[in-house]
Each structure stands twice: as C-alpha cells, then as structure tokens.
Amino acid sequence: MDFDLTEEQRLVRDTARDFAAREIAPKAAEIDKSGRWPAEIVAKMAELGFLGVAIPQENGGAGLDALTYALVMEEISAACASCGVIMSVNNSLFCDPLYKFGTAAQKAEILAPCAAGEKLGCFGLTEPMSGSDAQTMVTQAEKTSDGWVLNGAKNWITNGPHADFILVFAVTDRSGGKVRHTAFVVPKGTPGFTQAPPDHKLGIHGAHSCTVFFENCTVPDTAIVGNVGDGFKVAMATLDGGRIGIASQALGIARAALETSVRYAKERKSFGVTISNHQAIQFMLADMATELDAARLLTWRAATMKDAGTRHSMQSAEAKLYASEVATRVAHKAIQIHGGYGYSTEFPVERHYRDARITEIYEGTSEIQRIVIAASLLRA
Ligand code: CAA
C-alpha cells in the first residue's frame, strides 16, 4: 500500500480543508444548537463536487477515487459531523449503488443530478423492527401487470426529509427457502410515498433523518436497481463502501477533538504550568493521536482496496469498527482534558462526543462489524 497521496488527492483534501474551515466550522455550533438543515452548505458542497466525489464525470460526479472521497469526508466531518453524513449518504449509499447497479436510464436521469448535487438521495434499509438483522425486513413489493406495489415503513433514514429519491429495499419473494429482496429507486412525490418529520437525536442535529412510509406506492419496472431478487446483495455491497464513509466521518470527529485538546492543553494552566506539562495530559494526547493514526491507516487501506476493485467487506468493517470506537474514546478524553469546560457547550468537545456516538451504530453497529470481520476470517 502506497501511503503517499497523489498531488490531486492532496489538492482536493486541501480545498476541502479550506472550505470546511472558512464556511462550515464557524457555523457548526449553531447548526447543532438549532438543529437546522444546513442547506447553504449542502449547495456549496455540490458546487465543489463533494456530493459525487468518486462518481465518473460522465455520470455527473467529480471523477475522483474512493481515497479522495475518504479525505474529503474527514475534512468536512472535522468541521461538522452533520454535514459529513449528509455528504456520505448521498455519495456512498445512493450514488455508488446507482453507478454500480443502475441502468443507463437511471444513470442519466437519477444518478447524474444526484452526483452533481442538484438532487439528493437517501437509502432505505432499516425498519422499525429490523436494524442489524436487515434480511428480516417486512416492507414488501408485489408484482403487478405494469410494475410493483410497495408497502411498509423504513426508519432512521438520513437525508430522508430532504431527499429527492430513495433507494429502498423490499421483499419480493418468500416462496423459496430463502427470502429474496429487490432494490427500487423511488422519487419523492410518488403517490403513496411519504416522509415523517425529522427524528430527535443525541447528536448530528443538522443531519435530518426520519421514518418514511410506502402505502400502496406503485412504481414501474424501471425503478428496479440491479436484478430482481438481488436486493440484499446490493445493500451489502453498498454498505461495504458506506462504512468507509462513516469511518472517515469518525476520523474527522476524532481529529477535531484532538486538535481542540492540544490547543487547550497549551493554554490552560494548573499547578503553575500549562496542563500540557502534566504527564497525565500528555499520555492522553499521545493515545488519542496514536489511535487516530491507526484508524486512518485502516480507513485508507479499505478505500485503496475499493479503488483497486478488490473485495473489501472485512477491511471496511475493520475501519468502521475501529475508527468509530476511536472517535468515542478520543472525544471522551477530550472532555476529560477540558475538565468542566469540556462538559459545557462553550467548547465543541461535548458536540464531538455526542456526534461520535452514532458512528458506532449506523451503517452497522460495532457488533455487526465484528460479525462481518469474523465471517470473512472464518470463510478464508
Ligand atoms: N457483498 C455482496 N454480497 C454479500 C455481502 C457483501 N458485502 N455480504 C453478504 N452478501 C450476500 C451473501 O453472499 C449471501 O448471498 P446468498 O444468499 O447468495 O448466499 C447474502 O448476501 C446474505 O448474506 P448473509 O447470510 O451473510 O446475511 P445475514 O442475514 O447473515 O446478514 C449482516 C449479514 C452482516 C448481519 C447484515 O444483515 C448487515 O450488514 N446488517 C447490518 C445492516 C446495516 O448496516 N444497516 C445500516 C443501515 S444504513 C444506515 O445506517 C444509513 C445511515 O443512517 C447513515
């Protein structure tokens, strides 16, 4: 694995870093506090090509690679984790499967505007009674003479309240030994498809999620993404990529918490010296930096394998598992270093702590990542 970034990767990362510092970071606390959807930031991310980073230019994207996507995700998430996940869902969970499994017409009519950021996508797998055990979904699609009728509900749908399209998974066959699922792309406004108001959450307040409902929602055959019956594989392959995005989001959150802690440690005094002189603080900073670097290496390895077209289910799961748990540990230590100030909204570390926590849950909990890793080990 080559650890050197190309000139283009460095340039895009620096552009993202600069944009995030100038236009996102100053608003992050306000977005968190108000819980507003950061529409103006989403529009600017679109202008910069950040909503379709690794989608080819002929399909509306920026034509870069998965590693560059990971770099941009880290930068955006370091400034605002909500903006990071808005970007990640559109890139990894919507555009990527449309690019991999979509028809030419879906690529022209749906992928291109979404990858360009003119429209927004979301991903509907989770249901009220099936999160980790995704195959047990109850949403179903019944074949009719001229299409399919969808019925069911999906929840925790990030971008759901604002998305123009959803990639939704439904059971289409229960007749054999194995339940078969199929992926459909459904535009907002399709009769029978409705979105509930945004959920209330511990963190990532600007990244709205909601429950969506399908009530006798009729879609044509052309809404199918991939093959009929292959929906679960579409979902799993998509999450292999998505987990790189969430690992990168976790890196961004952890890095922001570490940088704030280093600054604070050099300013705050106790026992007559800045707290950076205390070995207790130094050890915490050292552990935070070491774990962050290790998490980044895992994430870049998974992204590099995705770029090489090598199966990376295990490596993405390792990256997501480790980076998300590192983000929580780093943010936890950041609060400790800040003492009482860390617990107050005066400093950003309490936001990082709240935002970090979700990275251990969505796109597969840490326990699910361990299942994916163990399954890969035992299959080999
Ligand atoms: N790529 C392609 N195919 C895959 C695959 C992959 N990575 N992983 C599994 N498959 C295939 C298998 O080969 C198998 O195929 P056959 O039926 O032909 O044998 C099929 O899929 C079923 O595989 P498993 O038997 O391994 O499936 P399982 O029921 O045991 O589940 C699981 C596996 C890993 C637990 C899976 O259910 C899972 O990942 N659960 C977590 C779901 C999740 O991550 N949800 C996140 C929702 S999205 C989100 O969070 C978005 C957001 O808000 C930001």
Image (cartoon, rainbow, N blue to C red):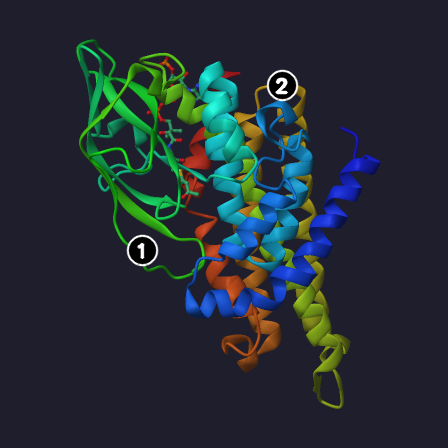
Please tell me which residue lies in front, 232 or 195: 195
Is 315 placed above or below 277 here?
above
Q: Is mark 2 in CB contact (under 8 Å) with mark 1?
A: no
Residue 188 placement, left or right of 313: left
Instruction: Report whether the residue tagged 2 is closer than 8 Å to ligand 1.
Output: no
**Where in the figure is residue 67, as x and y percent of width and height?**
68, 34
- Name the amino acid type tagged 2: Gly
- Residue at the spot of label 2: 309
Residue 138 placement, left or right of 320: left
Is 44 placed above or below 88 here?
below
Q: Secondary structure at mark 1?
A: loop
**Where in the figure is residue 169, as x and y percent of width and height?**
31, 27
How far apart in space, not on screen, are marks 2 and 1 (Cα)? Answer: 36 Å
| Circle number at residue 98 | none
Mark positioned earlier in the residue sequence (2 or 1): 1
* Whether residue 317 can be seen here: no
- Residue at the spot of label 1: 199
Please tell me which residue lies in front, 251 or 222: 222
Query: Closer to the camera: disc 2 or disc 1?
Result: 1
**Where in the figure is residue 236, as x and y percent of width and height?**
43, 26
Q: Residue at x 66, y 65 (%)?
A: 284
Is 24 placed above or below 10 here?
below
Circle 2 residues within 10 Å: few <14, some 14–19, many ≥20: few
